[in-house]
Amino acid sequence: MKLYCTPNSPFARKVRVVAIELKLDDRMQLVQATLRDNASPYMRVNPVGRVPALETDAGHVLTESYLITEYLDTLHEGPRLIPERGPERWDVLRLEGLACGFAQGVVTWVHEWRRPEAVRSDPVLAMERDRASRCIDAFEAEAAVGTLDTPARLLPQITIGAFLGFCDYRLPRFPWREGRPKLAQWYGRFAERPSMKATAPKG
Ligand SMILES: N[C@@H](CCC(=O)N[C@@H](CS)C(=O)NCC(=O)O)C(=O)O
């Protein structure tokens, strides 16, 4: 399999953490993609032009980090990250949906922040900050009742962990730990997992 990614993409990091946790990383070659260039050969691999994308051994190209995760979850014999049915499935997907919405929001926030000051929108920045804060409050409530400590919810934990790491990396002045002691403690432990350490953003 080939995983097209960029070095510090948090969506690609999520997939890389999943692959390590499922012991599939040895079967996955990382290929660096050039984004935002219409002439990039990657645009023929994934016309959407975003990473990650996974080329399977059968030659199919899967896009969207959640769908790639779903595919990887079919390739191993251990407990499923996404249960096939029953209340467990909807419990995982409930939290994963929230985590994915948080993820998309903080990436939008960073994109807006990086635009030239003359065109940057303060209302958009404020809206994304509020969105992220509401989600992080919800994660604090989950951490307080132990939801983030159960192995059955590893997938949303990975998504939350990858994107809290992204906040630290790209939004270092966003004090998300303030007033959220349980989440801060949980993240401190989660970030020590070998899969998280091996994929931490650099530079
Ligand atoms: N919904 C997508 C989002 C992927 C995404 O936004 N990736 C960013 C990098 S973190 C990207 O490729 N941005 C380039 C662009 O938007 O042109 C997923 O879950 O995979």
Image (tube, rainbow, N blue to C red):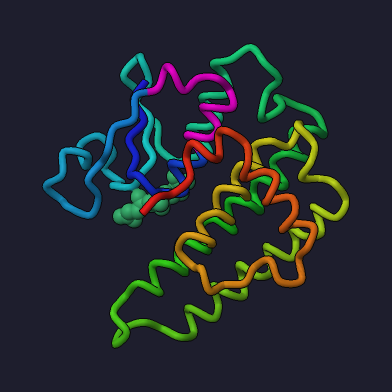
Write the residue at 47% across / 60% down: 169
Q: Main secondary structure of the magenta part?
A: helix
Q: Position of residue 108 (x, y in %)?
A: 45, 65
Q: Position of residue 34 (x, y in %)?
A: 22, 45
Write the residue at 32% across / 75% down: 115
Picture quadrant where residue 141 is located: bottom right
Quadrant including the N terminus = top left
Membership of 121 in magenta stretch: no
Question: Which residue is outermost to the right?
Answer: 145
In the displayed structure, does residue 186 sit left or right of residue 194? right
Write the residue at 48% across / 78% down: 125
Write the residue at 74% across / 65% down: 137
Picture quadrant where residue 21 is located: top right
What residue span does the magenta drawing correspond to? 15-28
In the displayed structure, does residue 78 sit left or right of residue 163? right
Q: Position of residue 122 (x, y in %)?
A: 45, 86
Instruction: Give the number of callouts.
Output: 0
Using the image as rendered, state which of residue 28 and residue 75 is in the foreground. Answer: 28
Quadrant including the C terminus = bottom left
